Amino acid sequence: MEPLRLELSLIMWCPSCRSEYRAGIAECPECRARLVDEAPPVDALEYIPDRWHKLEEFGDEIAARMVEGFLVAQGIECRVQDLTFRAEFVPIAPQLAKFRLWVEPSQADEARRLLAESRPAATCPECGLTLDAPGAPCPACSEADAGRRPG
């Protein structure tokens, strides 16, 4: 009788699509996400690896998703986590919405740099229009003090 041989095969997982890969593969060929050694939770739509860094928080999902899309297009691995409290049959007030943008640690500094370079120089306090030059009156609403930096 042959001795029983146990082979421990390490399975790697894609945190985006939950696909399984054998040891030695580092990146999901479909999602281009870096593989992790633990399976993402089945019921979690937005798995965030424990080692990732919080980059920013938003009160608006559209803004969070736009920043996420911008960073992904620049090759930054990131994910938005929806932390908004939801209760059945109760509308959510905008001030209660909360979205957190997480980034892979080795790409955090690059993500911060890209975001800083992409942010507008000034916005109009009256209508919110993005201005090309601080100090100029707003062309949309003629606000004289339109050239302040966003806060």
Image (spheres, rainbow, N blue to C red):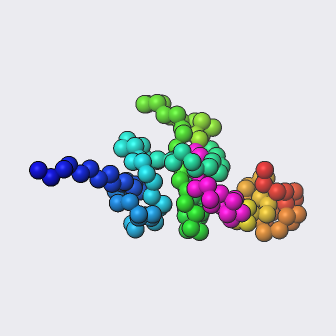
Point out residue 130 in the picture as x, y percentages from the top left corner. 73, 62
Residue at point 53%, 53% (across, down): 79
Quadrant in the rendering for residue 124: bottom right
Residue 140: x, y in percent? 75, 63
* Towards the viewer: 62 or 107: 107
Q: Residue at x 73, y 56 (%)?
A: 128
Q: In which quarter of the view is residue 50 placed?
A: top right
Which residue shows up at 37% across the image and 41% down it?
Answer: 43
Q: Is residue 71 visible?
A: yes
Frontmost residue, 82 versus 76: 76
Instruction: Give the magenta range.
Output: 99-115
Q: Nearer the viewer, residue 112 or 99?
A: 112
Q: Position of residue 8 (x, y in %)?
A: 32, 51
Q: Residue furthest left?
A: 1
Residue 61 appears anywhere in the view: no
Q: Nearer the viewer, residue 131 or 75?
A: 75
Q: Main secondary structure of the magenta part?
A: helix
Q: Is residue 19 left or right of residue 85?
A: left
Residue 59 place in picture, x, y as percent: 62, 44
Above or below: residue 117 compared with residue 91: below
